[in-house]
Amino acid sequence: MGPSYVKFSGTSVSRTILRGLGHIEEVRLERASGVTGELAVCLFDPQTQQWCIYVADSRNGFEQQPVIGACKDGRIEGYAYEPWEGTYIFSRVIWSEITATSFHWEQAFSADGGATWETNWIADFVRSD
């Protein structure tokens, strides 16, 4: 039996900060269980060529561990080591199919040190006017 997904809508508003070395994104997720607000602060380190992404939301508060990742071949892949149900697991996020008006985003968890991944969130973003 495969995973089951819940479809919902949302909006995301982002803006560039620090002359392109970062951006702030505010998200409103409209689920059947209620509205969730999220904030992501993404900061680029020119020396390491990596992004650090810090996230907070109105359900769980501030996530202490940033997602750290880099861009390669038009794809951004980032990882974090974060608490989950009393233990620590790896999480992975991937931004792919990036165009001027859209991108695909996926989140996955790994409880076995990255040997296998379980995708638990998929989102497709499309720019609107």
Image (cartoon, rainbow, N blue to C red):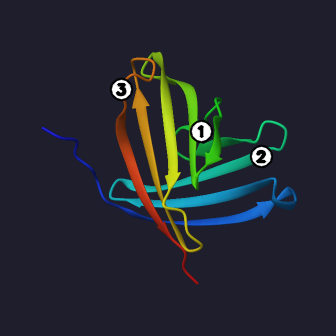
| Residue, disc 1 | 61
Mark 2–mark 3 distance (CA, rounded to whole Å): 28 Å
Question: Outermost residue, left direction?
Answer: 1
| Vertical placement of residue 45 versus 10, above or below | above
Residue 124 on image: x %, y %: 43, 62
- At numbered mark 3, what does the secondary structure look like: helix, strand or loop? loop
Mark 3–mark 1 distance (CA, rounded to whole Å): 28 Å
Q: Is residue 15 left or right of residue 98?
A: right
Question: Outermost residue, right direction?
Answer: 19
Of the image marks 3 and 1, the number of the one nearer the N terminus: 1
Q: Quadrant of residue 78?
A: top right
Residue 107 on image: x %, y %: 45, 43
Assess whether mark 1 and mark 3 are in contact (beta carbons under 8 angstroms). no
Q: Amino acid at mark 3?
A: Thr
| Residue, disc 3 | 116
Residue 14 on image: x %, y %: 67, 64
Q: Amino acid at mark 2?
A: Phe
- At numbered mark 2, what does the secondary structure look like: helix, strand or loop? strand
Question: Outermost residue, bottom direction?
Answer: 129
